[in-house]
Amino acid sequence: MAEKTDQQAINEQARSDEESCGVESKELRRKKRIKCIVSCIISQIIQTLIFTLIVMRVRTPKVRLGTVTFPNLVTGTQLIPYFDLTMMAQIKVKNRNFGPYKFESTNATFSFQGVTVGHVLIPEGKAGFLSTEKVSVTLNMSSNALPRFNGSLGSELGAGVLTLNGQAKLSGKVTLMLIIKKKKSAQMNCTLAINLSAKAIQDLNCM
C-alpha cells in the first residue's frame, strides 16, 4: 500500500512538472511575440521619420551662374568711362528634392552699383529630382543708363576690373510622390568681377 502511495506521489509530481514546463513555454512564446511586435513598431516609426524628414522634406532649389564668356567686350578709359559687352552665361538650377522642380519664366537683371545695365529672359523649365538644370542665355549690357561721367565706373576701368551684380527670382513647384505639389521660390544673387584685359571672369561669387 505504501509503495502505491509513493508511486502516485511520483506520478503527480511528474504531471505537475510537465504542466509547469508547459506554462513556462507558453509564457516564453508570448514574451517573444510581444518583443517581436514592439521591434516591428519601432522599426516602422523610424522608417516613417526618415521618409518624412528626408524624402518628403521640401528644400529650396539653388540658382547660380555657371560658365560665363564674353564674345564682345568694349570699354572706354578712366576719363571717358563706358562699356558695351555681350555675355554668354550658363544659369544653373540645382534641385535638391526627391521630386522634379518646375519653374516659370523670369527675368535675370544685371546691374552696376544698383543701376540696371542689362537683363535677359530665363525660359520656363524643369529640374529633375536631385539634379541640376542648365539654361544657356545671351545678353547685351552697356553703360548707357549710367551718368555720362561716372567716377566709380572710371575707377574700375582704370583698375582693369569691372564689377557687376546679377539677380533673379525663380517661382515654381516641387512635385513629390506624383501628387503632392509645393510652391518654392529660388533666388540668384551673383557678383561678377570681369578682368577687362583678359576678357574673362576674374571672380564669381553667388549667395
Image (cartoon, rainbow, N blue to C red):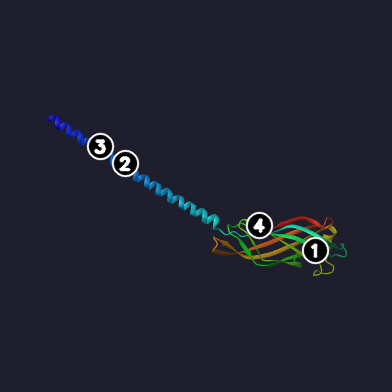
Outermost residue, left side: 1
From the top left corner, tell me how far across and down residue 130 is, in percent: 61, 56
Q: Which sits earlier in the primary sequence, circle 3 or circle 2?
A: 3
Q: Say left or right for 55 vs 84.
A: left
Q: Are marks 4 and 2 in contact (CB under 8 Å)?
A: no
Residue designated by label 2:
25
Outermost residue, top side: 3
From the top left corner, tell me how far across and down residue 109 is, in percent: 73, 66
Residue neighbourhood size for the residue with mark 3, other residues' Cα within 10 Å, grouped as few (<14), some (14–19), many (≥20): few
Q: Secondary structure at mark 4?
A: strand
Q: Which sits earlier in the primary sequence, circle 4 or circle 3?
A: 3
Give the quarter of the image for residue 133.
bottom right
Q: Which sits earlier in the primary sequence, circle 4 or circle 2?
A: 2
Q: Nearer the viewer, residue 87 or 169?
A: 87
Q: Which mark is residue 86?
A: 1
Give the quarter of the image for residue 196.
bottom right
Identified by mark 4, the residue type is Thr
Q: Which mark is residue 132?
A: 4
Residue neighbourhood size for the residue with mark 4, other residues' Cα within 10 Å, grouped as few (<14), some (14–19), many (≥20): some
Residue at position x 76%, y 67% in the image: 118
Distance between mark 1 and mark 4 Cα atoms = 25 Å
Q: Is residue 140 above or below residue 29?
A: below
Q: Secondary structure at mark 2?
A: helix
Residue at position x 62%, y 64% in the image: 102
Residue designated by label 3:
17
Identified by mark 1, the residue type is Thr
Q: Quadrant of the C terminus?
A: bottom right
